[in-house]
Image (cartoon, rainbow, N blue to C red):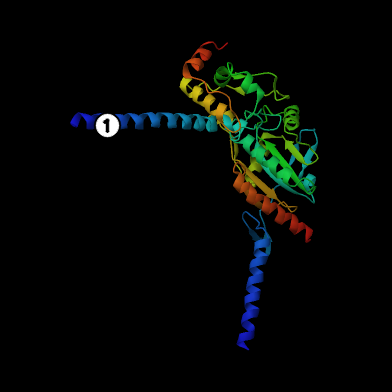
Amino acid sequence: MKAKLIAIWFAALGIILISNCTSSKGQQGEYLYNVYCAPCHMEDGNGLERLYPPLNQADFLAENQEHIPCIIRHGIEGKIIVNGVEFNEPMAGIEDLNDVEINNIINYINQAWDNDIPTVNFKTTEERLQQCP
Amino acid sequence: MKYILLPIAMMAILSACVEEERQLPIYGEVDIVEGDTIYHTIRDFTFMDQDSQIITNETFADHIYIADFFFTTCPTICPKVKQQLIRVRDAFPDEGRLKFLSHSIDTRRDSVPTLRKFADKLNISSDRWHLVTGDKKDLYDIAEDYFSIAKEDPNAPGGYDHSGYIILVDKNRHIRAYCDGTDPDKVDAFMKDIQKLIDEIDEG
């Protein structure tokens, strides 16, 4: 009886810990997005006119998934075309973010607003970051 | 007789309330000089906009305008303020009496051509909206007139510290409304103030 109770207690603890983990993961991506990315890309992900490109429903984001981790870390310069519109404003990298945080931001962006881009697992993000130019 | 006076008094009080609600206040310190009331007034200025036009107080004679402080490489609040200002402009599309004056506080990087490029990317046209640069001291000093902060700060993101206020100025150079330009709800209320000031002009 006592063993059973302990088992239940551990199971409950496990569930609480796991659910905490997943929910804080989602929150961390959103929180970091709002701190580091939203000033330019805006909280609704729609960017600003022809100055800062959108992330919401953006073909560039969907088609460049393998480059996104390095863009977040090291920034990007030069001309890019997003949904047929040319943008040419340098973006500074955010060197302070670790691999996990970058992964969480990507998964927030991929699923936020009207986006439905598959989420990316941590291993993939880690590998992509190792291959940054 | 008493009973007749009471409704009249009440009506007077009510109409006073309504009147007060319709008129926007004049913000800032008030001086009384020889019996005249002197309100806080934006000082004389001379700046240059994105199309190399000289911009002075005269540019805004017979207009009302919204002022703000920014720099083009600002990584924090400026894009949000610009987004909200664009929303204000688009809410008054045909109101020629409403103009915009955005002061760049980064005199080192924000040259006239840089401001022009920035304006083009935001679809900002100088017939209504002037992005200006000028003498650094003049820009930082005039920020005080607009209850704003503008200063160099190596510890601030992007190298400059400034507030995100947007300020509504009437044709007599008095500040009639201001708000945090990063907060869409406050900007909604601010737009109602703009309409009140436009109504005030219409009423003469």
Question: In the depicted view, which residue is nearer to us: A118 or B156?
Answer: A118
Q: Which residue is mark 1?
A: A8
Q: Quadrant of the N terminus of chain B?
A: bottom right
Query: Residue A108's x, y, as percent?
Result: 53, 28
Q: Amino acid at mark 1?
A: Ile
> In terms of image quadrants, where is residue B81?
top right
Q: On what subunit does the disc labeled 1 rest?
A: A
Question: In the depicted view, which residue is nearer to us: B37 or B13?
Answer: B13
Q: Residue at x 67, y 27 (%)?
A: B109
Q: Residue furthest bottom?
A: B1
Q: Residue at x 64, y 85 (%)?
A: B4
> In terms of image quadrants, where is residue B93?
top right
Q: Residue at x 72, y 41 (%)?
A: B101
Q: Residue at x 56, y 17 (%)?
A: A70
- Is residue B103 placed above or below B158 in the rendered structure? below
Q: Could you tell whether A33 is left or right of B202 in the image?
A: left
